[in-house]
């Protein structure tokens, strides 16, 4: 079980480690024939990743001081969120981005534990947790449904999910 002390907000010194973990995961994804996150390999979101750390939206998961996972929670819509979900005039959602687990730590239940940690430790007055993922990644889509997310449809080859808090 993921202990609270293993999860913390990222600080600026964590930025490059987070980018490295995301690139390692993106390479693993590509090597396994999954059409997702190629833009991360070329540094396509490095600035955005570092800005999310600066804005205190990015978390890291540690095991014996090794960075094994990361995720970002934002209570404001990004341009991408607006593209996928449409304008959220009610501002009732938190958006989960870049949930990534070090490939050597995959298939150990860490993703499920992270979602459980978010449910139990993230404080917000928002009503929904929303996320998107590539629609043709059936394993990832099944993972989110199995963890209580409701499928909302598809936009631009991305599945949309939400979970009521």
Image (cartoon, grey):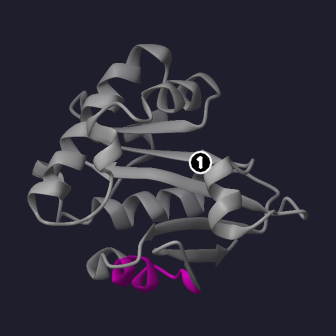
Residue 106: within the magenta? no
x and y, in percent, of residue 30 in the image: 17, 56
Quarter of the rendering containing residue 161: bottom right
Quarter of the rendering containing residue 1: bottom left
Quarter of the rendering containing residue 165: bottom right
Secondary structure of the residue carrying numbered label 1: strand
Residue tagged by mark 1?
73
In the orientation shown, which residue stands out farthest toward the front? 156
102 displayed left or right of 75: left
Residue beneath the point at 30% across and 25% down: 17
x and y, in percent, of residue 57 in the image: 60, 37
- How many other residues sit within 10 Å of disc 1, few (<14), some (14-19) or many (≥20)? many
137 displayed left or right of 130: left
Observer-nearest residue: 71 or 121?
A: 71
The relative height of residue 97 versus residue 116 in the rendered view (above or below) is above
- Chain part drawn in magenta: 141-152
């Amino acid at each position: 079980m993921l202990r609270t002390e293993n999860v913390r907000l990222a600080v600026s010194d964590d930025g490059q480690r987070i980018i490295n973990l995301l690139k390692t995961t993106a390479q693993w994804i590509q090597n396994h024939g999954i059409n997702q996150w190629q833009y991360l390999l070329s540094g396509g979101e490095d600035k955005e990743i570092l800005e999310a750390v600066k804005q205190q939206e990015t978390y890291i998961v540690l095991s014996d001081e090794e960075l094994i996972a990361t995720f970002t929670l934002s209570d404001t819509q990004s341009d991408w969120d607006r593209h996928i979900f449409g304008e959220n005039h009610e501002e009732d959602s938190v958006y989960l981005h870049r949930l990534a687990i070090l490939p050597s730590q995959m298939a150990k239940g860490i993703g499920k534990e992270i979602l459980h940690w978010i449910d139990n430790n993230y404080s917000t007055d928002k009503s929904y947790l929303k996320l998107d993922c590539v629609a043709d990644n059936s394993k990832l889509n099944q993972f989110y449904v199995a963890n209580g997310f409701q499928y909302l449809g598809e936009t631009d080859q991305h599945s949309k999910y939400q979970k009521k808090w």
